[in-house]
Image (cartoon, rainbow, N blue to C red):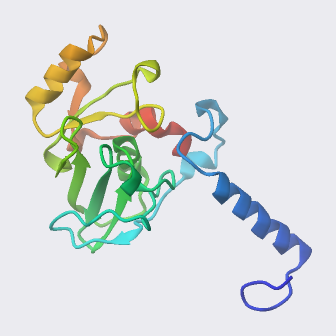
Amino acid sequence: MNGPNGRPLERRRLLGFLGTGLLAGSAGCLGGDEGEADEEDDERTVDPTLEHPGDEPVAFTDEQNCPICNMTPADYPNWHGQVAHEDGTGAAFDTPGCLFAYLVITTSDSPVAGAWIADYETGDLVDATEAHFALITDETAVDDPMKINPRSFADRDDAVAFLEAYDAEDLTEEDIIEFDEIDRETAEIYRSNRM
């Protein structure tokens, strides 16, 4: 069998290619339990995956994949989001939980120029840097495309009303955060198996 450069593959390299393909093919947001991460996973980073002008959101396409879970953001219009960096790069995400993880583990040292997320009530893309995120943690009470995700709202009053209607005794207004409060601890609530 020949490799990408046209030369014959050694057995070890062939097995390496096959193993890498198997791992990539099995990737998805639901993979792995939280307790399964090894020390290598603790050091995971991701690169921006698309060109992004930064002044407004770009169209979601079937060719884009979430850098955190490899799912297609265009398939989740009520959940997806994106980030643009000042250097013209960015990334698209299928869910707010993946956006949280990206902000923590991205290799980009370019500041965020813009970010957008689907409003939980309307599905419209809103300015994520001005959004309010309700930190839902109950995996059994949600209909997320993945285990759990924060709920994104353009208006803080909508986030408060959601929590009141959600009727979870352990959730209060203190469980609503803004974009600049997203940190590793918060991201790990949603994607610890991807960080």
Q: Residue at x 82, y 91 (%)?
A: 7
Q: Is residue 121 left or right of residue 11?
A: left
Q: Residue at x 39, y 25 (%)?
A: 142
Q: Between residues 11 and 75, which one lies in front from this camera angle?
A: 75
Q: Position of residue 172 (x, y in %)?
A: 22, 16
Q: Is residue 172 visible?
A: no
View extreme (right): residue: 11
Q: Between residues 16 and 81, which one lies in front from this camera angle?
A: 81
Q: Position of residue 152 (x, y in %)?
A: 24, 37
> Residue 60 lies in what quarter of the image?
bottom left
Q: Between residues 134 and 174, which one lies in front from this camera angle?
A: 134
View extreme (top): residue: 169
Q: Is residue 124 left or right of residue 75?
A: left
Q: Residue at x 27, y 65 (%)?
A: 59
* Up-down relation of residue 113 to residue 180 (above or below): below
Q: Quadrant of the N terminus?
A: bottom right
Q: Is residue 124 visible?
A: yes
> Residue 92 lies in what quarter of the image?
bottom left
Q: Is residue 70 left or right of residue 31?
A: left
Q: Position of residue 32 (x, y in %)?
A: 63, 38
View extreme (bottom): residue: 6
* Up-down relation of residue 138 to residue 99 (above or below): above
* Up-down relation of residue 80 to residue 174 (above or below): below
Q: Is residue 100 left or right of residue 181?
A: right
Q: Position of residue 110 (x, y in %)?
A: 29, 67
